[in-house]
Image (tube, rainbow, N blue to C red):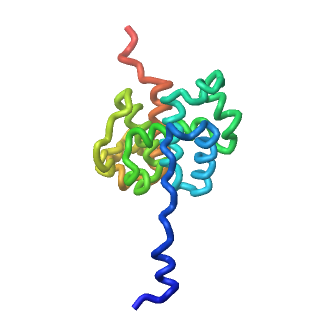
Amino acid sequence: MMQPQEVRLLQQPPPPPTPALWEMTLEELRDAILQCLLQGPAGHYRIGRLYNHIVLCRRAVNEGYPTTREYFRQHVRVLSYRSLVMFGAVARKFRREFCEKYGMVQLGLLLEHERLRYGHYPYFPGDPGAVPVELPRRAGLTLTKPFADCTLEDLRQWVRARRAHQHFPEPAGPLA
């Protein structure tokens, strides 16, 4: 038999639905981003989705700001624009479940890994855990590990090494 207190819990109305993004004002979208920041890593995927909406629908530009970047520089100072862009890219390329499983920063580094390797951001239809990542080791050797087994430091090290290699490419051959 149910206790009276349990009956009250079951009779509470459900929370109101979240308004659709296109129904929200720019200020409401900004407030939603700031609320997501309070949730920590759990809110980063939603920040990416909100950022993508503001950019793709040109919400800030339509409100009179010269650029979306300028809007965020003025109104969302607690989060760098670089982080917003990364959250947006990850939210665009990965499903929420993978963002929660691996983390936005790790997936952002995986995207950067793939961009530096292939020149573009690939689409990941499934779990990116099996994607091979070549990690630099001493004496020019590499170690290939699946993404799921890589640490955050492994990925950062790879991106640093790859960027350094792009700035100082090896000569094509001996000079004649």
Residue 111 relative to residue 43: left or right: left
Q: Of all residues shown, which one is farthest toward the top?
A: 176
Q: Residue at x 60, y 29 (%)?
A: 60
Give the x, y percent position of residue 15: 51, 61
Q: How many marks?
A: 0
Q: Residue at x 40, y 11 (%)?
A: 175
Asked if one can make out residue 47 in the rendered structure from this viewpoint, the answer is yes
Give the x, y percent position of residue 143: 34, 47
Q: Is residue 17 above or below residue 140?
A: below
Q: Residue at x 63, y 27 (%)?
A: 63
Closest to the observer, 106 or 137: 106
Give the x, y percent position of residue 105: 49, 47
Closest to the observer, 84 or 8: 8
Residue 91 relative to residue 148: left or right: right
Q: Is residue 7 above or below residue 159?
A: below
Q: Is residue 82 above or below residue 14?
A: above
Q: Quadrant of the C terminus?
A: top left
Q: Residue at x 48, y 54 (%)?
A: 17
Give the x, y percent position of residue 72: 64, 34
Residue 77 relative to residue 11: left or right: right
Residue 32 relative to residue 163: left or right: right
Q: Is residue 22 above or below residue 61?
A: below
Asked if one can make out residue 145 in the rendered structure from this viewpoint, the answer is no
Q: Quadrant of the N terminus?
A: bottom left
